[in-house]
Amino acid sequence: MSQDSIILMIKGLFVLMALGALYLVALRPLVRLLREKPDIELLTPTLPDRLVEEEELQIPEKLGTGPNRQQMLEAAKADPRNTAMMVSRWLKEKK
């Protein structure tokens, strides 16, 4: 074996080791992460238990025309994600 062929084999060995390390460190965890189904409960906002159990939302009884207080509470409880977005938008406008 000549010196050039030994150097070529060593380079090939390093390339194979680098590809193996890339597979173990990056590709394998990425594929595992993509195969998992996301936990929907972690993605949806929730109200603190203290607020839900101890306090009621302070919504006036009469607002003029439109839905009454009970209808607004039911709509807010039915779609918490939309309610959270509306409240955050409202708070940004108040600043």
Image (cartoon, rainbow, N blue to C red):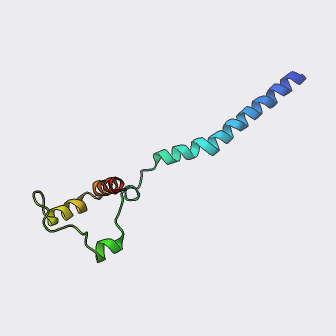
Q: Is residue 11 visible?
A: yes
Q: Position of residue 3 (x, y in %)?
A: 90, 24
Quick check: 34 above or below 13? Answer: below
Q: Is residue 43 above or below residue 7?
A: below
User: In this view, which residue lies farthest toward the left?
Assistant: 65
User: Depth check: 39 or 35 in front?
Assistant: 39
In terms of depth relative to the viewer, which is nearer, 80 or 67? Answer: 67
Q: Is residue 27 left or right of residue 62?
A: right
Residue 70: image location, x then y, percent:
15, 66
Counting the numbered discs, the total is 0
Quadrant for residue 63, please give it.
bottom left
Placement of the C terminus among the 4 image quadrants: bottom left
- Horizontal placement of 84 versus 3: left or right? left
Choose top left, top right, bottom left or bottom right for residue 44: bottom left
In the current view of this chain or complex, which residue is farthest to the front? Answer: 95
Which residue is painted at 32% across and 72% down in the image? 51
Asked whether the viewer can see residue 1, the reply is: no
Residue 30 lies, with reference to residue 79, above or below; the image says above
Quadrant in the picture for residue 28: top right
x, y percentage for residue 29?
56, 47
Q: Which residue, as the protein is rendered here, is positioned at the far bottom?
A: 54
Which residue sits at x=13%, y=59%? 67
Where does the N terminus fall, quadrant-wise? top right
Q: Position of residue 65 (x, y in %)?
A: 9, 57
Q: Is residue 88 left or right of residue 28?
A: left
Horizontal side of 11 relative to 32 (left or right) equals right
